[in-house]
RNA sequence: GGGGCAAUGGUGUAAUUGGUAGCACGACAGAUUCUGAUUCUGUUAGUUGGGGUUCGAGUCCCUGUUGCCCUACCA
């Protein structure tokens, strides 16, 4: 199985919060019980556990699917069982090969490794068909010739029981014949269906003679035009699970009402079957269990609405870094490990919870803090001239400063960044009329340049519009590397409150930085007006064209060897110090051809928070 | 109106199955810090209402309340 997943998946919580080790969520407890009872094999054999991720290839995977993948895959890993990837491709009207490809890529990226080949429900169509005929012969299914409207009408509603179809008790031979001709394509779409004969008065609407097959005269992306009938979800899903030997068929809460049907179909197939009869043995009966889907704030996961975002141009595509799709968060710079930690952290329950988006951001920060190499990058450059640079050596000299690659990982070592007489600092790090608690650069003030020298601002140069265009500063050669200068004659050590980032003007490279923020400003996009578009964040993307990064920013082999910057998906991610976490985007800047970096998430900023309060 | 499911600090989640309601995130306060980051310490705040059983109830019983799901030839 996977070598990227944690050894024990599931509801991992940081150590120390449990009385006796790890607590187990309700699905783990259920599986534990079944294993003890020997429901799936020899009592105590944990390796019998088999789970699956069963996407329909009709769209892109989103962050909600990550929860399902991580649950199913995690369970298989934990028990030493198997995890399968299977496409539930039973509807040729919605499904396409491109989605198959993108989903495979996304599941792989999430770190889930499946057993054997990718499976397809469509590979089992022949078997489904045989079992359907079996049900007809047992008098448990029939071909109905009512129109869709009539069927709906006859189904009744929650208060009124339905009424039986006039075709319900037609002879078995007649249904068998019609069913075969439906399969061959003799009838138009919608003219006939195969229905299970259950109970038109059931309080559970799913049991009111559910449709098993409908006629769809349309080629399927994998089976071509072999079939003119296609199985419905309820009929197909349990059979897919059964064929694959799935023990735990895990799905979301809205399928709770479908479980009786899931069980009914398998029981119906098994009716009259005998374990001793090699030609007519009962089929495997998996356990369906429902859990609450992931439900983060500030995002939407409705396929229809995501599609609308793309088609109306509110984002640039399915992999726009603001999209909650797996492709989107990948491009945003999120890590599969961070996403997995988030999924495990929120637990597995049947409670319809709401998950703070900031929890996901924290999980990403947490992962990236440990693993991302540090770099210096100035988003909005403000020129700083060191006026006394020539007084302490050659005016054109460059001093190479040691900079730490990752304070969280000593082994990541240091790199050298060039320091010279002309620098750029962040415009936001200078204020002419600074509030008292502003620790950065101000007129007459002194500040530390990270890994560099301490500088003091003596003069503010403005252009004709009054905008600050340059700062004239002096540096203290005794603060090389950022260290405090030696004590003065009275033994007092000079201190500086702030440390800011910078680049050397002659060395820095121009890059484009895309600052992404949440796509929506509302916790529940569309809640107020019904339309999420109304809650779009107008500032979800800010493109910074003239950013400057230190010259040798690429991740080095040395760093990778230490574990810092070693990302399994090959995406280069960094912490731009004091700014946030960024990743390299495949795009190059349209304007300049420069490298593009995407901001995954900012650093926590207690200064911004305090400033907002005032 | 019928059926199914659920409910523990602001949020999410535990509680050895009847025995001290704990953890994480957040918020707040402080310490450390060459990133206003990280790290560390402390504070904060909870069993959906009402009855009952019990020496003892988040847990069992009764009864309300609230939320989600269900009337596609989608999944």
Image (tube, grey):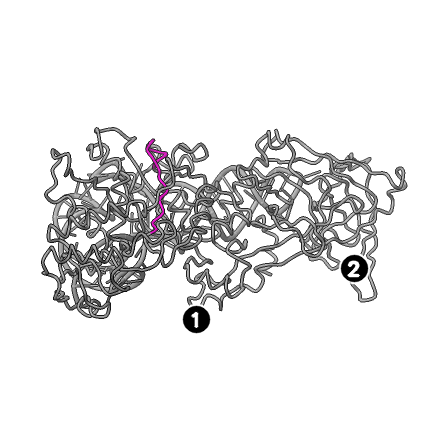
Q: Residues within 10 Å of mark 2 (few under 14, many from 20)?
A: some
Q: Secondary structure at mark 1?
A: loop
Number of numbered discs? 2
Closer-to-camera residue (A106/A461): A106
Q: What are the residue bounds of the magenta stretch?
A: A76-89
In which quadrant of the rendered image does the N terminus of chain A lie? top left
Disc 1 target residue: A529
Q: Residues within 10 Å of mark 1 (few under 14, many from 20)?
A: few
Residue at position x 76%, y 54% in the image:
A382
Closer-to-camera residue (A147/A421): A147
Mark 1 or 2, closer to the camera:
1
Q: To which chain does the residue with label 1 belong? A: A
- Mark 1 and mark 2 in contact? Answer it, CB < 8 Å: no
Label at residue A468 = 2
The earlier-in-sequence mark between 1 and 2 is 2
**In magenta segment, residue A82:** yes
């Amino acid at each position: 199985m996977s070598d990227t997943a944690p050894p024990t998946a599931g509801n991992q919580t940081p150590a120390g919060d449990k009385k006796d080790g790890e607590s187990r969520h309700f699905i783990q407890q259920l599986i534990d019980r079944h294993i003890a009872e020997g429901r799936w094999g020899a009592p105590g054999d944990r390796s019998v556990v088999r789970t699956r991720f069963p996407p329909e290839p009709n769209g892109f995977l989103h962050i909600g699917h990550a929860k399902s993948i991580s649950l199913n895959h995690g369970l298989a890993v934990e028990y030493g069982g198997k995890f399968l990837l299977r496409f539930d491709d039973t509807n040729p009207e919605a499904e396409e090969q491109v989605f198959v490809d993108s989903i495979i890529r996304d599941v792989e990226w999430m770190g889930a490794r499946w057993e054997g080949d990718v499976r397809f429900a469509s590979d089992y169509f022949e078997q489904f068909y045989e079992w359907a005929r079996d049900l007809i012969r047992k008098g448990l299914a029939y071909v109905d010739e009512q129109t869709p409207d009539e069927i709906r009408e006859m189904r009744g509603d929650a208060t009124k029981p339905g009424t039986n179809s006039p075709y319900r008790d037609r002879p078995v031979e007649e249904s068998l014949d019609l069913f075969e001709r439906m399969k061959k394509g003799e009838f138009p779409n919608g003219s006939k269906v195969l229905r299970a004969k259950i109970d038109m008065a059931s309080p559970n609407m799913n049991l009111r003679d559910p449709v098993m097959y409908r006629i769809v005269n349309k080629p399927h992306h994998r089976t071509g035009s072999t079939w003119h009938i296609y199985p419905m979800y309820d009929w197909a899903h349990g059979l897919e699970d059964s064929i694959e030997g799935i023990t735990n068929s895990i799905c979301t809460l809205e399928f709770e009402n479908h479980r009786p049907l899931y069980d009914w179909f398998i029981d119906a197939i098994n009716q009259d079957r005998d374990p001793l009869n090699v030609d007519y043995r009962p089929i495997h009966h998996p356990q369906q269990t429902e859990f609450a889907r992931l439900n983060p704030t500030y995002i939407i996961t409705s396929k229809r609405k995501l599609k609308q975002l793309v088609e109306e141009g509110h984002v640039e595509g399915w992999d726009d870094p603001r999209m909650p799709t797996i492709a989107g968060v990948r491009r945003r710079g999120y890590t599969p490990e961070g996403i997995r930690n988030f999924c495990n952290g929120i637990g597995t329950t049947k409670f319809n919870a709401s998950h703070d988006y900031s929890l996901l951001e924290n999980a990403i920060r947490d992962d990236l803090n440990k693993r991302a190499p540090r770099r210096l990058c100035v988003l909005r450059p403000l020129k700083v001239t060191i006026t006394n640079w020539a007084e302490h050596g050659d005016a054109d000299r460059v001093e190479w400063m040691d900079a730490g690659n990752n304070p969280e990982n000593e082994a990541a070592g240091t790199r050298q960044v060039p320091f010279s007489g002309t620098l750029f600092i962040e415009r936001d790090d200078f204020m002419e009329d600074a509030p008292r608690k502003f620790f950065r650069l101000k007129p007459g003030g002194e500040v530390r340049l990270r890994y560099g020298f301490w500088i003091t601002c003596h003069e503010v140069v403005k252009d004709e519009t009054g905008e600050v265009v340059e700062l004239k500063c002096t540096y203290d050669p005794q603060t090389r590397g950022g260290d405090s200068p030696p004590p003065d004659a009275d033994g007092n050590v000079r201190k500086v409150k702030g440390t800011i980032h910078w680049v050397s003007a002659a060395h820095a490279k121009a890059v484009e930085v895309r600052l992404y923020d949440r796509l929506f400003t509302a916790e529940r996009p569309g809640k107020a007006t019904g339309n999420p578009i109304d809650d779009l964040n107008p500032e979800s993307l800010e493109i910074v064209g003239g950013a400057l990064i230190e010259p040798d920013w690429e991740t080095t082999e040395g760093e990778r060897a230490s574990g810092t910057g070693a990302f399994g998906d090959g995406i280069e991610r960094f912490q731009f110090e004091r700014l946030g976490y960024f990743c390299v985007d495949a795009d190059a800047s349209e304007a300049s051809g420069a490298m593009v970096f995407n901001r995954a998430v900012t650093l926590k900023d207690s200064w911004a928070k305090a400033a907002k309060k005032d």
